Image (cartoon, rainbow, N blue to C red):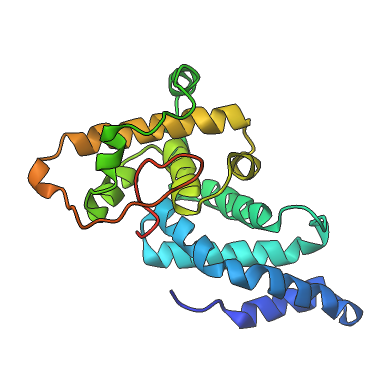
Amino acid sequence: MRRLDLGQLGKVRLETFSSQNDTSFTTFEELAIPLLDSLYKFARWLVHSQNDAEDLVQETYLKALRHFTSFQPGTNFRAWMYRILRNTFLTSRTGLRAASTVSLDAEEEEGRELAVENETPETILMNHLNSLLVQSAIDNLPLHHREVLVLCDVEEMSYREIAEILQIPIGTVMSRLARARKIVRESLHSLPRALLSRDFPQSAVCEEEIFDVAAL
């Protein structure tokens, strides 16, 4: 990933903060820069393009810096940054196309899913699947399922934090996650067994261990 355009950030800094308020910019840097890699990874899951992901992250940091004075100290800064990135994506042409595929019927169907299933022999088997096959299956998920799965099983966020980022109830997070895992599981189970790899490590993700996507 290319570095952030510090020149643009510096310009926004001058536009946003007075010379007497440099501590605010320093605080922003201290909080935001450590999140750069994880935000970029999330952006890649959303847009599937390195250049688009870099542009999305760049725009996210510029917007966050402009509005940093509105951030409430003591609240979840990571969730605040992820929410800005997601909202920036949703207002892009790619995001609008992806969001338009979500139907009310799909939302209603989510509510009938169990929140999260317990570990079973088939979920243990999922831990040994080839990572590229898992990535492909996740890439094919609808946006509202893909983002929940990535935030939970890749970023290892809690249900509460995911709900804060997506601005949906925790129950909806759990039902979408269960539905996403079910779709991925069914997709992977349809593959030939010869594609399975026993060398792929297991890892605990989110509240339940389903399959390992953290290494992608």
Whether residue 210 can be seen here: yes
Residue drawn 17% across the image and 52% down it: 197
Between 201 and 98, the residue placed more toward the observer is 201
Residue lying at 47% horizontally and 57% vertically, measured from the top left: 43
Residue 178: horizontal and vertical position, in percent?
Answer: 43, 30
Q: Position of residue 195 (x, y in %)?
A: 12, 48
Left or right of 145: which side holds 10?
Answer: right
Residue furthest to the right in view is 20
Q: Quadrant of residue 12?
A: bottom right
Q: Is residue 97 visible?
A: no
Above or below residue 9? Residue 185 is: above
Which residue is rendered at x = 51% and y = 79% of the image? 3
From the viewer's perspective, is 62 left or right of 18?
A: left
Q: Relative to 74, is 13 above or below?
A: below
**x and y percent of residue 152 in the render?**
49, 45
Q: In front: 62, or 25? A: 25
| Quadrant of the drawing holding the N terminus | bottom left
The spot of residue 7 in percent (x, y) is 63, 83
Residue 199 position by quadrant: bottom left
Q: Quadrant of residue 63?
A: bottom right
Q: Is residue 5 left or right of residue 182?
A: right
